[in-house]
Amino acid sequence: MSWEITGMSAVCALGDTVAGIHGALCSGRSGLAPLSAFDGSKYRAGAAYEVRDRVRSGVDEPLRATRWLVRVVREALADAGLPEPEPGLPVLVGTTHREMRTTELWWQHDGPLSPTDLHFTAALHSALGLHNVHTVASACAASLYGLGMATDLIALGEADTVVVAGTDAIPESSFGGFDRIQFPPPDTVRAFDRSRRGMIMGEGAVAVVLRRAGTYPGRVHGLVRGVSMNCDASHPTAPDSAGIVRAIEDAHARAAVVPDDIDLVIVHGSGTAQSDLAEAVALKAVFKAADPGPLVTAIKGGMGHISGGAGLLNLVVALESIRSGALPGVSDLTDPIEEVKELRVVSGRPAAGPFGTAQVHAVGMGGINAVAIAEGATR
Amino acid sequence: MSAPAAVRTAITGVGLAVAGPDFDPVTALAVRGMRHKDRSSRFAVQVARRTLDDAGLLGAPELDGAAVVVSSNFGNLDAVCDSVTTIATGCSRDVSPMRVPHLSSAVSAAWIALDHGIRGPSLTLCNGASGGLDAVAAARNLIAAGRATAALVIGVEPDTPPVARLHRESAGTRWIDGAVGLVIEPVRHAVSRGARIRAEIAGYGRAADEQSAVRAAGATAIRRLDADPTARFGRCSGALGVVQCAMAVEQLEGEAVARQSARPVLAVAGAGAGESDGTSVSALVLTPPREPVHTSPQVPVHTPSQVPVHTPSQVPVRTPPRGPLHTPPPRGRDT
């Protein structure tokens, strides 16, 4: 079974369209910039990948994650030719931080907060009339968890069309928490590089419209072939390559593909010592017999780690790479770790296609993994 | 949205970790291994053990392929608010590294998976007051889609300073401090391992209003759950639907003991629950066990095969109600 992606939209520090974000990645741009709303004296790190849409620089606003979510869902539905969707259309929103930034502004500065702000049903209901909204908070694998659940809803006959999204705005607590545990603070995200120092937070939102294959006559961006979701259950914070291997193998089985079928992989690639290593070891194990094996890249050097939406952003960038025949390289990768030496990691200029089938990863804190297999559109 | 049951699933374990005669949070939340966990995770870990024990699955090898599904709306508020205060009064260096994992809403599910080696999906839903029922439906879908051999569903809401403030600001006077758990597994699997089936999961529906949700669940003729979770625990938020399922099991078992006829029970959660957080409603039907029940030593259970049972899965959605239509009891409101 496969599922068609008929609409998509994204916003992050690199741009506000999927094609624009992909183009920025291919030209090697980075959205990293000095902190605009947090008090820089509180942190060792002074930069993040923010969406620069605050009305007044230096003054934070509530409900930014909600605002971006409404926007990308509306745009993805319009892109899919569904500007006035059925009210019961399921919407699965992957998020790590929900509206924790709004919660902080409430707690610290007496800003407004209602229990309804902590999930996304009320906002999507008032903006688009949608009520069947699920807020999936499975850490940074959340949006690919949402994608997996969406394929299940369609396969089980509960829906023909599902919107899958991800959204997060950077909360001060998490920015500060990572600032506490990453020392010295990373200056850039350097996935798979020996000198990598960690993850830098980003923010933004992404949405896709997923439909039962063969029910839509219009343009299709790509096909989802299969999505896996699991948990390492081995360590509270450090990822385990065995859990990632299981996630990749389950995704391949669900997609009915073999390692040789995969043309490109966009890894989670957060730039942390342990996560990159676990993914590299997992890829080596899965693709050891593949010849020549897939091209491998990571995109967080461009827009940082946008948390809940990261996996779905990997997916839409993969589809745009297939469509355009250009796969952006890992940024700032000059001295690769031993474990990726046998992998075809792209660095520097984009790699040229044609590409057919992509694999994308999301590796969340708590050992929560999800892997999706997708292929390019045939029409 | 309504869900046809592709695989029959049942509740085979129920656990409660709320202050009461058999649970003292002061001691239970302070046992070995709890020191670096937040209040939500402590409750979740305790209720997971109790629920798996109740289902006879503690230490069972099949947990490797199971799922954890947690419903919670306020679980991580404490860690987030506490950390942002720490930063405001000092700087990021003052944040404890042990606090960092708890900034994620997904941490309770991850601790449970780690505690029991549960390597299937780790799903956390933060859907508002309908979340507990949505979690049960999501667990059933994970099983039906072949992603999990069984699912441990946990509803957890801790009482912490930010949670108390948020409730008070939204006209709440009393709220739960604890967790409730269910084990959900395929009926076939439960029967083959000799587990006691407590209830089967039948229709589920979600809609913008209560009437439509009940219709979507195929439950217009089904009686409501007798008990009112809000009267017993105060606002239950993300735990509400899980508490309702636990109470429905209690009700069905009480009726079985009293040799009353076995009839399905409907739980409804979401907008209108008086928790100021809903624009949608979920409805879920639980039916009494259809398979012969393994009698437990304490509770003599009436064998349901002696009783003719009409379950929603046997009744098409638009069939007119059989028998008298049950008037819903007045809804408990927490003001």
Image (spheres, helix red, strand yellow):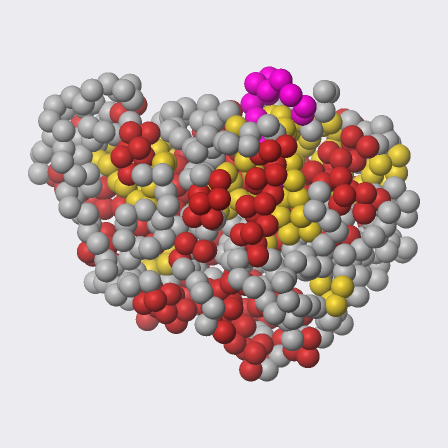
Residue B240 x/y as whole percent:
31, 50
A155 in the magenta segment = no
Q: Position of residue A334 (x, y in %)?
A: 90, 55
Where A236 sits versus B87, above or below? above
Residue at x-position 53% and y-position 52%: A66
Q: Quadrant of the N terminus of chain A?
A: top right
- Whether residue B299 can be seen here: no
x, y (%) of residue A317?
73, 40
B293 or A222, nearer to the observer: A222
Left or right of A17 in this view: A330:
right
Residue lying at the far front of the rendered structure: A55
| Rendered residue at 45%/56% (across/down) | A117
The residue that appears at 51% across and 68% down in the rendered structure is A104
Task: Reply above or below: B110 against B184.
Answer: below
Q: In this view, does B92 lie to the left or right of B57?
A: right
Task: Report the magenta residues as a range.
Answer: A207-220
**Residue toward you, A254 or B205:** B205
Tell me which residue sits at (59%, 50%) in the image.
A68
Is A210 magenta? The answer is yes
A55 sits left or right of B31 in the view = right
